[in-house]
Amino acid sequence: PHPRYDAWALHSLIHVYEHQGRASEGQSLLRQERDWWEALPDLAASVHFGTHLARFFIERGNYKAALRTIDTAVCQPIDGEGARAELGLVPKDINDDDADISGSGQGSEVRVPAGAERVLNAPTPDALSDASACLWRLELSGVSGSFR
């Protein structure tokens, strides 16, 4: 089957390209399939594919494209712009008086400690790890990834 229908297959193929030094092919494949992997329901998986694409750009010396990819495919989705809420992973308006996250159907008020929304919308640890590793690779290449 085509890797498009299997995230693990695409991921495995990308690693083959990386380990064989075939950055051009890996970059082409990820660019071709970008709409698909960015729409994956697992935010960490889509961010991880974004870091692979950025790493291919870094490997080929295209630092502007790497930074642009980090901004659009890595940092933007995990930057708390409601990405996790938009994916249905947390209630969109946790402080809504009519919200019912208990499943009771009673419409009871939700009491949430101050600042809890930020925790609920926080990026997953693996997404943060991927993003920081990508920025570190840029730094090692002499390119500042600060302010991201």
Image (cartoon, rainbow, N blue to C red):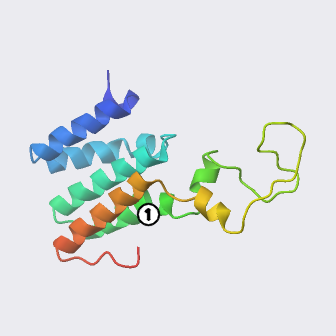
Q: Is residue 113 left or right of residue 85?
A: right
Q: Residue at x 28, y 62 (%)?
A: 133
Q: Is residue 74 above or below residue 105?
A: below
Nearest the eye: 11 or 124 = 124
Give, as a three-letter code, the residue at label 1: Cys
Q: Residues within 10 Å of mark 1 (few under 14, many from 20)?
A: many
Question: Viewer-proximal residue, 62 or 75?
Answer: 75
Along the viewing direction, whichever of 30 and 118 lies nearer the viewer:
118
- Please tell me whether residue 3 is drawn above or below residue 65 in the rendered image: above
Q: Is residue 64 above or below residue 20?
A: below
Give coordinates of residue 81: x percent, y percent.
59, 63
SS assignment at label 1: helix
Q: Quadrant of the N terminus?
A: top left
Residue nearest the viewer, comparing 36 with 86: 86
Q: Position of residue 4 (x, y in %)?
A: 37, 32
Q: Residue furthest left?
A: 20
What residue is disc 1 on?
Answer: 75
Which residue shows up at 18% across the image and 77% down it? 142
Q: How many marks?
A: 1
Which quarter shows the C terminus?
bottom left
Residue at 16 percent across and 42 percent down: it is: 17
Q: Residue furthest top?
A: 1
Please provide percent x and percent y for residue 33. 36, 41
Quadrant of the rendered image containing residue 69: bottom left
Q: Name the residue rendered at 35%, 47% in the picture.
A: 49
